Image (tube, coloured by chain):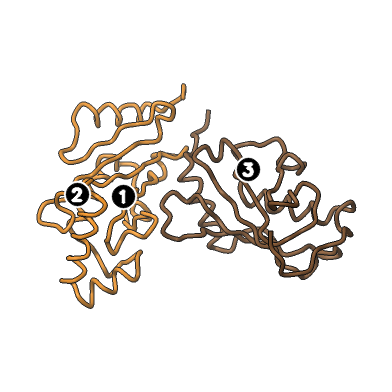
Chain colours: A orange, B brown
Amino acid sequence: MANLPKRIIKETQRLTEEPVPGINAVPHEDNLRYFDVSIHGPSQSPYEGGIFRLELFLPEDYPMCPPKIRFLTKIYHPNIDRLGRICLDVLKSNWSPALQIRTILLSIQALLGAPNPDDPLANDVAQKWKEDEKTAIETARQWTRTHAMS
Amino acid sequence: MSAKVPRNFRLLEELEMGEKGLSADGCSYGLEDSDDVMMSNWNATILGPPHSVYENRIYSLKIYCGSEYPDEPPSVSFISKINLPGVDQRTGRVDLSKLARVAQWSRNFTMEKILVALREHMAHPNCRKLPQPPEGTEF
């Protein structure tokens, strides 16, 4: 990994030196474009108390194209599918090279606090969320206890 | 040096190719369990190539991608019984070193490439007329 772009080196340094509260991102020693990430579920959300593991990869064209990121911890959320893939505009069409790993992780944490069932990735979850939000939130709490608190 | 795509993101790319039906002619593949976050076990099919004894038969296979994939090749086995050099006649396991195109494994190779190589192997003059077990039997 001799030719790691300066931009990535700087972002990594800043993530370590000035970490974002509730978010942790550490590159793999053998692949500095590949990060182990954990995000604490936001308070006042059904994910509160949970620690969610994710993986993040900076493709060759980063920052011209967005990072690739997905949840490894199972999560019940209308914008996250069963394989942990995330539906979030800034990871797709609204990506800009001015965004960073840090801002993306904050957006994902915000998404946990504000599920958007009108732009779903997990259709069954989104439908449940719209039909019976109370039960959906309770299911999300249960999943958090089962999968994100061990 | 170019970025090295980690196993899981590589498998997600392959999954999307398979889901969009972008796989090569006569081959398809997908996750065995759509909840499997590690994406280890896959199902695949090969449509028997034309002008061979395999024509019009659909062959089912299973593929296992271990933790070292794609640095290491996956393990590939036929579920449908087939008489084909390089396929273990007791287990259905495919010996990838017998397939010219993938024998020298590279991390750029995909499950699709293996399936295409197998289908070509079935159509090879040395293989395409071999006597076959009855259709519908399994290993």
Q: Which amino acid does label 1 sit on?
A: Thr
Callout 2: chain = A
- Tell me which corner region of the image, top left, top right, bottom left or bottom right, holds residue B46: bottom right
Q: How crowded is mark 1: few (under 14 residues within 10 Å), some or many (20 or more)?
A: many
C-alpha span from label 2 to label 3: 38 Å
Q: Residue at x 35, y 31 (%)?
A: A27
**Does the image show residue B26?**
no
Which residue occupies the foreground of this view, A53 or B92? Answer: B92
| Tag nearer the camera, 2 or 3 | 2
Marks 1 and 2 close (CB-CB < 8 Å):
yes
Secondary structure of residue under mark 2: loop
Q: Residue A19 placed where, x, y %?
A: 19, 33
Q: Residue A99 placed where, x, y %?
A: 29, 43
C-alpha span from label 1 to label 2: 10 Å
Q: Identify the residue under disc 3.
A: B109
Q: Residue at x 23, y 74 (%)?
A: A130
Q: Residues within 10 Å of mark 2 (few under 14, many from 20)?
A: many
Q: Identify the residue under disc 1.
A: A73
- Tell me which corner region of the image, top left, top right, bottom left or bottom right, holds residue A112: bottom left
Q: Residue A79 placed where, x, y %?
A: 30, 61
Q: Identify the residue under disc 2.
A: A50
C-alpha span from label 1 to label 3: 28 Å
Q: Which amino acid does label 3 sit on?
A: Phe
- Which numbered dot is residue B102? none
